[in-house]
Image: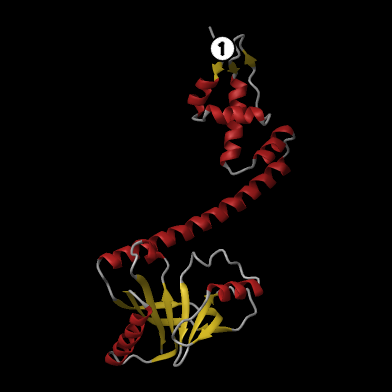
C-alpha cells in the first residue's frame, strides 16, 4: 500500500497549486521525501506538515526570504520580528483598501447623481483644510500642464496623484486660484486655510467652464433666498471620476463656509 502522496494529491489536500509547491521546492523550502523511479515527487506526512507551516507564514504576509530564515534558523525573536513586519504591511494594506472603498462609494454616488440628473444643495461638515496655491489667474483658467509640472517639480511634490484626484479652485472677486489640497501640511508653500465647520454645498454636472459661472450665480441666489450668512471664499471642486461616465459633461461642486 502506498504511504506517500503525489504532488497532485498534496495540491488537492492543501488547496495549493502544484506550481506553488514546485516554487517552494525551487526556493529550497521543502523537499519531497521520495522521488519514484518514474520521477514522481512523493510526499510524507512530515513533508505536508512543513508545507502547511510555509503556507501559514506566507498567508501572514511573510516574505520568502523571511520564511527561509525562520525555517533554517528558527527562534522566537526572528518569528516575532517577521510577524511584526507582516502586521505593519497588512495594516497599510487595510488603509489602502479603505481608501479604495471610499473612492468606489464616491464613484457610485456620482453615477447615481448623473443618472438622475441631480443638482443638489446640501450642508457638509469639514475639518480644517489647507490649500496650496499653485497659480492665480483671471477667470479664463489659463493653466498649462507645464506650469503645473514645474510647480510640483520645484517644490518636490509627489506628482503621482495629479491625475487621480479632484481639482480644487478658490474663487475670489476678480481671480481664481488653482490649488492643491495639503491637509497634512507637508510643504512650506503659500496656502489658504479653510477653517473647520459647516459648508453649503452645491453639486451639479456641466458641459463647460462657462456654465460654472451660472452655477455660482445660482449658489448666491440660494444663499439670499434662504437668508444664509457665509464667510470666506468659495471653493470649486472639479470631479475626476465623472469623466468615466460621460464624454461631454463633468461633475463639479461649489462650497462655502456658513457662519
For image coordinates 49% across by 64% down, the residue present is: 164
- Considering the numbered disc 1 on the image, is that residue within a helix, a strand or a loop? loop
The x, y position of residue 3, in whole percent, is: 56, 12
Residue 224 sits above or below residue 133 on the image? below
Q: Are there few (<14), some (14-19), or many (20+) residues within 10 Å of tag 1?
A: few
Which quarter of the picture shows residue 225? bottom left
The x, y position of residue 4, in whole percent, is: 57, 15
Classify the position of the C terminus by image quarter: bottom left
Question: Residue lying farthest top?
Answer: 1
57 or 204, nearer to the observer = 204
14 or 213, nearer to the observer = 213
Which quarter of the picture shows residue 50? top right
For image coordinates 46% across by 90% down, the residue present is: 172
Which quarter of the picture shows residue 112? bottom left
For image coordinates 43% across by 91% down, the residue present is: 231
Q: Is residue 79 visible?
A: yes
130 or 153, nearer to the observer = 153
217 or 70, nearer to the observer = 217
For image coordinates 64% across by 71% down, the residue present is: 153
Q: Which residue is mark 1?
A: 3
Question: Residue lying farthest right?
Answer: 73
The x, y position of residue 201, in whole percent, is: 36, 79
Q: Is residue 155 visible?
A: no
Q: Is residue 52 left or right of residue 107?
A: right
Q: Is residue 193 left or right of residue 62?
A: left
Total numbered labels placed on residues in the image? 1
The x, y position of residue 237, in whole percent, is: 43, 76
Colouring chosen for the image of the structure: secondary structure
Amino acid at each position: 500500500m502506498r504511504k506517500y502522496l503525489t504532488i497532485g494529491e498534496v495540491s488537492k489536500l492543501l488547496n495549493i497549486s502544484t506550481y506553488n509547491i514546485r516554487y517552494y521546492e525551487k526556493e529550497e523550502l521543502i523537499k519531497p521525501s521520495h522521488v519514484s523511479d518514474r520521477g514522481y515527487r512523493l510526499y510524507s506526512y512530515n513533508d505536508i506538515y512543513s508545507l502547511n507551516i510555509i503556507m501559514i507564514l506566507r498567508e501572514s504576509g511573510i516574505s520568502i526570504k523571511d520564511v527561509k530564515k525562520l525555517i533554517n534558523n528558527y527562534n522566537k525573536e526572528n518569528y516575532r520580528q517577521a510577524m511584526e513586519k507582516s502586521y505593519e504591511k497588512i495594516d497599510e494594506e487595510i488603509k489602502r483598501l479603505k481608501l479604495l472603498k471610499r473612492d468606489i462609494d464616491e464613484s457610485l454616488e456620482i453615477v447615481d447623481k448623473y443618472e438622475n440628473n441631480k443638482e443638489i444643495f446640501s450642508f457638509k461638515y469639514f475639518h480644517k483644510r489647507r490649500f496650496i496655491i499653485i497659480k492665480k489667474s483671471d477667470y479664463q483658467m489659463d493653466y498649462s500642464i507645464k506650469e503645473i509640472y514645474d510647480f510640483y517639480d520645484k517644490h518636490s511634490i509627489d506628482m503621482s496623484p495629479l491625475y487621480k484626484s479632484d481639482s480644487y479652485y478658490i474663487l475670489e472677486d476678480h481671480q481664481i486660484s488653482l490649488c492643491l489640497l495639503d491637509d497634512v501640511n507637508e510643504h512650506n508653500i503659500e496656502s489658504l486655510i479653510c477653517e473647520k465647520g459647516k459648508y453649503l454645498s452645491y453639486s451639479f454636472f456641466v458641459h463647460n467652464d462657462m456654465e460654472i459661472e451660472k452655477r455660482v450665480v445660482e449658489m448666491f441666489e440660494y444663499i439670499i433666498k434662504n437668508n444664509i450668512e457665509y464667510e470666506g471664499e468659495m471653493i470649486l471642486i472639479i470631479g475626476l471620476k465623472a469623466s468615466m461616465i460621460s464624454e461631454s459633461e463633468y461633475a463639479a461642486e461649489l462650497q462655502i463656509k456658513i457662519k
